[in-house]
Image (cartoon, grey):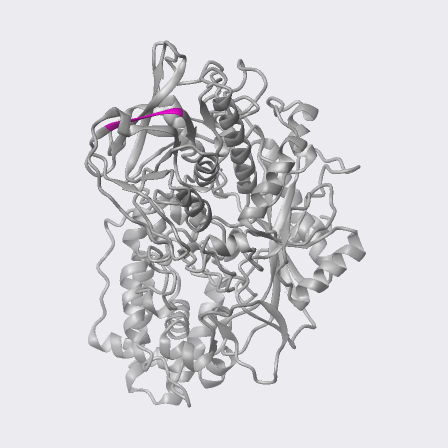
Amino acid sequence: MVKYSLILSFTHSFIVYYMNLNIDAVKNQTFDAIVVGSGISGGWAAKELTEKGLRVAVLERGREIKHVEGYETATKAPWEFLHRGRPDNVAAEEYWAGMRTGYTANEEHRYLFENDKQNPYIEKSGGMDWIRAYHTGGKSLLWGRQSYRWNKADFEANLKDGTAIDWPIRYEDLAPWYTYVEKFAGISGTAEGLDVLPDSHFLPAMAMSAPELAFKKGLASKMNRPVTIGRVAHLTKPTQQQIGIGRGSCQFRNKCMRGCPYGGYFSSLSATLPAAARTKRLVMVHNAIVSELIYDEKTQKAKGVRVIDQNTMAVTEYYAKIIFLNAGAFGSTSILMQSKSNRFQNGLGNDSDQLGRNIMDHHLGVGAGGTMEGFDSDYVFGNRPNGLYIPRFRNWGNDKRDYLRGFGYQGGASRAGWNRGVGMDGFGADFKESLTHPGNWSIGFGGFGEILPNPNNRFTLSPDQKDRWGLPQLVFETQFGENELKMRKDMANDMAEMLEAAGAKNVNTYNSDKTHIGLGIHEMGTARMGRDPKTSVLNKHNQVHSVKNVFVTDGAAMTSASCVNPSLTYMALTARAANFAVEELKKKNL
Amino acid sequence: MNRRDALSKVAILMGGTLTAPTLMAMSRVGEKPASVAGIADFSLTDTQRKIVAEVAEHIIPKTTTAGAKDAGVPAFIELMLKDCYKQPEHESFLEGVTNLEKSNFLGLSATEQVAVLKKLEAETNELMKTYNVKAVKVGDNVDKESMDAKKKGVPFWRLMKELTLSGYFTSEAGIKASFVYEEVPGKFEAIKLKPGQKAFAY
């Protein structure tokens, strides 16, 4: 039997009542809607569908983590970690994909990431960094929180430059939904009025340090390029609605990835799941790995899902009128691939053969850094969980390059800490004392580049290699293309040029040739939206073309990648699709 | 070669500034998974432990505030080498500590010990130049360091310095003695540094 927790009530101290129920009867496993996954998009699906009156089961494959009390490392001091955060050799071997990121396998964060050795995948050609987080809230507990709207051109780029297929929606379709999700989630930032980076509905912006302000001013006067404070899903001045749901202001600890006991940043646990629970129409089921959708040949709909309990291996079925797949791009697509029937012999909704293709991410590990001089008397108080953002300028306006699309930069300035001593000459009493004071200012920015959709960047299901639950392992074939590699040269050189123009000294570039797709942890593509069922999996409402009661609203739906962080767009797409699904239900179209 | 090309060929050598604390030399971006199997079990003799403790105390001596020994750094160094480093560093570390043992380090006067360590530091600097150390930004707020010292291992002095500093400045005694520790800052603002002001730790 699947153990399940029925959330009956919610207050802002997050009181949750549990009932362990053993239920066989089909009617008790039947809901209005099933949401697969409780991460950033699944949380939104749960909130929207329950608030619109539906009884919703959220099936989370991982363990239960409770808001606040489940954040094991959130309030630990540095000395409370045995290796002071550093992964030991055993962890490094077990979290081999996480080690490539440089932070997910650390002692502070590891409890929220999956053990790669126990959850294997296959890198058939090229490298693939597949970073997973199976627990309540998924990667919404761990994300970078950078939140940017796409611009108009992002939705038109495929059509204009003849890449892949056109998006079936435009900026105007999503704009009201961006506003809607921003008001609830809380995005702090500064309105700039730029076409390239449309403004959100903002909470007050975080501050910049003196050298950051000087860099911003220098870049504006020397190169006429804007710099803005990072737009980030942190509460700088919470609204009554946000306070009412139990969230508080960001405390500027910058320990976000351990889980935030203040609810200072947006996550499913701090925001959308409590909102859904408050309706008393939410049932959370943990440890529930959805192996496949159950297709009904007569109705041409999916009537439910088959679930394997991750601990007991017991198989259960759940039924609903509509199903939202929010299992993370590769999770959602692999469920569709595994859903084989007479009608769909190559995976549910896969008439186009597009399932698993066009894997995208943002490429990084390239940029430049330098020093900022003349700010010896300037410092900052607080540990800002955010940096500065330089919006895309390449292939924008009159600029034309020998590659398509563009990139933005994230970075900032800081004074060196004690760790500068490692590379410095000297030791002893004076050396020790000197390291207790702030060091010199440095400034650095890394690029986030758009990756083009490429049908050959794909995953398939292994015919013979299985995971612990007997489900096929994913086989990845992912390589950067010429376009990405050309772009990277500009990403390094442009940053160096800007730093020098704005007055930085000792400027150096870097461009790692050892990064893989996946390092950005922005997994996108593999079940793209489009107008034509022959070339896409989803329609303009994130609805599977050929199975109308199945919606996919996570990164899998993306038809192209833009160069900005994707989560805000997943939120908007999900809220929009949920609204459409409920309207269709009311019209009895589903 | 134009200016841009010249810039892109400059490696960030150690001694420059790194913007993030992830400066552990053992992080190697994109490297294939390594196996734990085959790692020699690392341990030190009592004499070697005393040498490590003395070297650590020379790097961070007891002054009006706690020193490396007070903060438990010697045990931390051994733990870290055993748990977090592999054979190349086990060998380079043991080579370094054995050299000090052979030169009767513990029998030298404090002044003589300092002279030995200064010479060791100069030699290590020369060695590190050949290892092509680079800083690479790999995430929103994450830098890593890569170097070509895979076969030989990071030199003893560099390991001692890195582990002594990280052991001390992340210990309770070290943090509280050295910095203004702010667990919950509650705000972020640009401020002016007062003369002699300590750095904040969070």
Point 67% across, 66% down: residue: A211
Total numbered circles: 0
Is residue A392 positioned above or below A73 on the image? above
Residue occupying image coordinates x 24% and y 62%: B42
- The image shows residue A80 at horizontal and vertical percentages of 33, 68
- Residue B120 among those drawn in magenta: no
Q: Position of residue B165 (x, y in %)?
A: 41, 73
**Vertical placement of A561 versus A16: above or below?**
above
Q: Give the range drawn in magenta.
A: A316-321
Give the answer, above or below, for where A267 lies relative to A3.
Answer: below
Residue at 33% of width from left, 44% of height from top?
A7
Which of the 4 image quarters holds residue B44?
bottom left
Pick whichever, B131 or A245, lies toward us: A245
Eyeballing the image, is B86 above or below B107? above
The location of residue A445, given as percent across then percent down, is: 61, 54
Question: Looking at the image, which is closer to me, A31 or A530?
Answer: A31
Residue B168 in sight: yes
Q: Specify the quadrant that holds the N terminus of chain A.
A: top left
Asked which quadrant contains residue A337, the reply is: top left
Residue at the image position 72 percent from the left and 59 percent from the top: A216
Q: Residue B86: x, y in percent?
A: 31, 56
Q: Is residue A124 visible?
A: no
Q: Mainly helix, strand or loop, the magenta region? A: strand
- State the residue in front, A388 or B106: A388
Direction from residue B165 to residue A148 in the image, left or right: right
**Considering depth in this image, is A311 or A429 the residue closer to the camera?**
A311
The answer to whether A298 appears left or right of A520 in the picture is left
